[in-house]
Image (cartoon, rainbow, N blue to C red):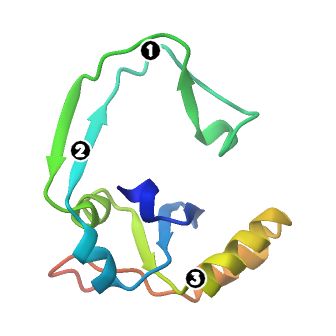
Amino acid sequence: MVNQYAEGGGIHNGTWYVYIPMSKEQFMSLDNGGSVYRLPSKSFEANEEHGLGNLEWVSREEIEPEDKVDYPSILDALLGNSINVYFVTQETADEIERLKSKNDWAGVDKMIKNLSPEKRPNQTE
């Protein structure tokens, strides 16, 4: 579900993040939950030429999941796994993508720094 609605994401100051170009209310009305699979790492290797480079790992072998965790809410799953979630306007998402396409990582960092991440219930900071 995240891929369906998330515009993009990455790492900012050592923390994974995702930005979603809609309001939290819109997202929650579409959030039907999902699953996270834990995969065995032995056949995976970094794919330097694709996506996130050495942060994106692939396996050329068929694998079976070791575990599956179902979540009633994708937002809860993201926040519960220490991923910062930002609900942004489409214009903000487009600007971040424009900066990424120009490899302007300082500009991306500046934009992310100025956003406020969602907080888990009972989370103060």
Q: Write down the residue under mark 1.
A: 42
Q: In this view, does 41 lie above or below 26?
A: above
Q: Write down the residue under mark 3.
A: 90
Residue 125 in sight here: no
C-alpha gap between disc 3 and disc 2 = 27 Å
C-alpha gap between disc 3 and disc 1 = 39 Å
Question: If you read the primary sequence from the N terminus, does the residue marked by circle 3 or circle 2 appear first?
Answer: 2
Secondary element under disc 2, as helix, strand or loop, is: strand
Q: Are marks 3 and 1 in contact (CB under 8 Å)?
A: no
Q: Quadrant of residue 25?
A: bottom left
Q: Which is closer to the viewer, label 3 or label 2?
A: 3
Secondary element under disc 3, as helix, strand or loop, is: helix
Mark 2 residue crowding within 10 angstroms, few (<14) / some (14–19) / many (20+): some
**Residue 10 location, x and y as percent?**
58, 59
Q: Write down the residue under mark 2.
A: 35
**Residue 86 location, x and y as percent?**
45, 78
